[in-house]
Amino acid sequence: MEKEIQFHDLEKKVYNLVCELGCTIIKDILENQDKQLMKNRDKKEYRHKGYRTNTIKTVMGEVEYTRAIYKKGKKHIFLLDNVINIDTIGKISSNLAEIMLKSVVNTVSYRKSAMEIKSMTNETISHQALQQLVWKVGKEIENKENQEIKLLKNEKLVKGTREISALFEEADGIWFNLQGEDRKKANEKYKKQCEKKNIEYNPKHKHKTELKLHITYEGWKKDSKRHELVNKHIIAGMMSPKRLGQLRNARLYQEYDVEKIKLRANNGDGATWIAKIATSDTICQKDSFHIQQEIVRDIKDKKCREELIKIIEQKQYDKVHNYIENLKYELGGEEKIVNKLKTLQSYLKNGLPRYQDILQEQGRELPKAPEGIEYRNMGTMESQIFTVLEVRLCSGRKAFAKKGASYLSKICAIYYENIGEIEIEKIESVVPIDNGVEEWINEIEENVRRNKKMHRADRKEIDSYQYAQGALIEITPELKEVLKLSESTALMYR
């Protein structure tokens, strides 16, 4: 303390010192444990074959330690790795991996995330390493999704038991620019289309694709000023409508007793793929934001726009078509204006009534909301799209490979579904399998085998003669038929 020192510098130096000390402690614990295992091992079963050095990146810095390698039969193993569950993704500890993934979600690029991690931990991570981690974890999530779909198809998924009155669904997508091999493929396809249609090829043409987002929730938190969603589940990624629907069904099946749901409502922008994922008993409606957006896009006159929006808000849906039809003449009847109004007519042809209106038309009552939950007008998707996807994938000038965007979106979905938490352990956990049906079938098959065996044994005993009530009697063909009948009856009851 002879020289002046700034607290800011002091804090950094102490932090680095403590982190170095922490890495040394972990190294000593691991190596001492390895020595104990070496002393207590079965020397005949585990033949010592030398030492290997391993390095793990942690929140405190790199931990480099040495552990013994053994030969068991034809395999080489590390006893230390088997005894201590060193939870890593590659060479990165799960704690550091979780911090890295959270940082990726909350920053606008991999490079900025790498800088943030360097300032938050005592570890230096490159932006390439961050990208590789996202791809690895994203692939893990995708594999788990495939497993859920497969188990549901094979009727081996564990059925949920929670009972709810209503389930709300919303879906939308964002478009992003392609890069790398995906962009080259899209460009080649575009070239062929230009040649086929005999139109000029534009080398600066941007190639985009859609990333889908789907949410389900049980309602809105009662008396919440922010209209918080209750038990929100998010699905995101590059996938077909069919696969998205299958994954949605698998997720719902694991949590709810789906047959007990009285109301299912779907809110979307009217895209074809959203209609495809709706079940037969789902009430579909168009999102209010997109309805107004389409009206503003196709009607330039402000007064006319406001009048049409007012008609829809007053639920006078039967007047919409005629109002737009009259506008074709009132606004001059120009071809450009008429074509836009025709587009608007087509868009507003269906999906205007809210789920409450449709229930009323069908003579059905709105189910009673559970305690602490209320049922409101749907329309949260634009907020979800912005928060979950747009902030990370569309801020600034961005382009992604299809898989890269899909994997990143899945991590974003987990982060926002779990209110700012990402747990590697949950991501890597195995999907529970319901073996009840299989065990039941195995039991039936075993009973059938046992009964057949008993039946064969009985047939051997019943040859040509048999004692009955102490008397030796002859088994006639007629009596054989009676015995067969009684055996079949007994077999059924067994």
Image (tube, grey):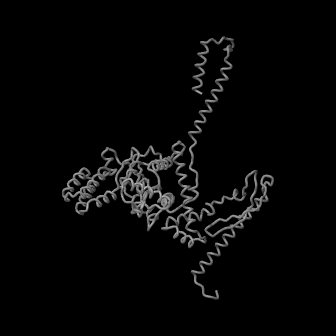
x then y, percent, for residue 248: 46, 50
x then y, percent, for residue 245: 45, 48
Name which residue lies at 57% across and 26% down: 492
In the picture shown, does residue 416 fall above or below 350?
below
* Viewer can see residue 409: no
x then y, percent, for residue 159: 51, 45
x then y, percent, for residue 26: 68, 67
Name which residue lies at 63% across and 60% down: 87
Q: Dividing the picture into quarters, in which one does residue 14 lie?
A: bottom right
Q: Is 302 placed left or right of 138 in the picture?
A: left
Q: Quadrant of the N terminus?
A: bottom right
Between 223 and 75, the one lying in front of the other is 75
Name of the residue lying farthest toward the right: 44
Between 268 and 158, the one lying in front of the other is 268
The image shows a total of numbered marks equal to 0
Between 131 and 348, the one lying in front of the other is 131
Name which residue lies at 21% across and 58% down: 334
Q: Is 236 placed left or right of 295 in the picture?
A: right
Name which residue lies at 64% across and 29% down: 450
* Viewer can see residue 89: yes
Name of the residue lying farthest toward the bottom: 2
Q: Quadrant of the C terminus?
A: top right
